[in-house]
Image: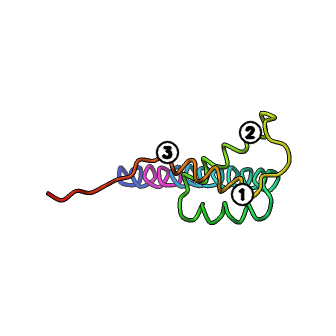
Amino acid sequence: MQMDENQTNTAGGLKDAQKRRLEDIQKRQAAEAQLSAIVKKVFEPAAIERLSNIRMSNENLYMQIVQFFVSAVQGGKLFGKVTEEQVKQVASKLLSTRRETTIRRA
């Protein structure tokens, strides 16, 4: 009888874990859908295409750029849609702040 209880507890634990994982996936998908809607509202189509290319190569840079422009629009500092040129300028400024890594051989 004790084995049946352990199997029940294990099965219940697995179901709980699966349920939590499913909830996490659904939350992530909802957040991505919300972000996508904001991007479509704030950026021009060419800028969206540029952002998608950036996202494929560098997810962190993509998030920094989107957050920068969304906060600028929400703060009333930017009017109209964001152009591809503006995305390029911000991306280059964000990338220029990185330190270059050099490897020296002894």
Give the residue at x 51% y 49%: 96
Q: Position of residue 13 (x, y in %)?
A: 47, 50
Q: Position of residue 8 (x, y in %)?
A: 46, 52
Q: Which residue is mark 1?
A: 85
State the predominant SS element of the stretch in magenta: helix
Residue type marked 3: Thr
Residue at far left of view: 106
Quarter of the picture holding the C terminus: bottom left
- Secondary structure of residue under mark 1: helix
- Secondary structure of residue under mark 2: helix
Residue 14 is one of the magenta-drawn residues: yes
Q: How is the image coloured?
A: rainbow
Residue 72 numbered tag: 2
Front-most of residues 19 and 72: 72
What is the CA distance from the residue labelled 2 to the residue labelled 3?
A: 20 Å
- Above or below residue 45? Residue 99 is above
What is the CA distance from the residue labelled 1 to the residue labelled 3?
A: 19 Å
Residue type marked 1: Glu
Magenta residues? 8-15
- Above or below residue 76? Residue 44 is below
Q: Position of residue 72 (x, y in %)?
A: 74, 39
Give the residue at x 71% y 51%: 35
Q: Is residue 59 left or right of residue 34?
A: left
Residue 28 numbered tag: none
- Secondary structure of residue under mark 3: loop
All told, the count of numbered labels is 3
Task: Using a 10 Å C-alpha cutoff, classify the residue at mark 3 as few (fewer than 14 neighbours), some (14 to 19) or many (20 or more).
Answer: few
Give the residue at x 77% y 56%: 83
Q: Which residue is mark 3?
A: 97
Residue 42 is one of the magenta-drawn residues: no
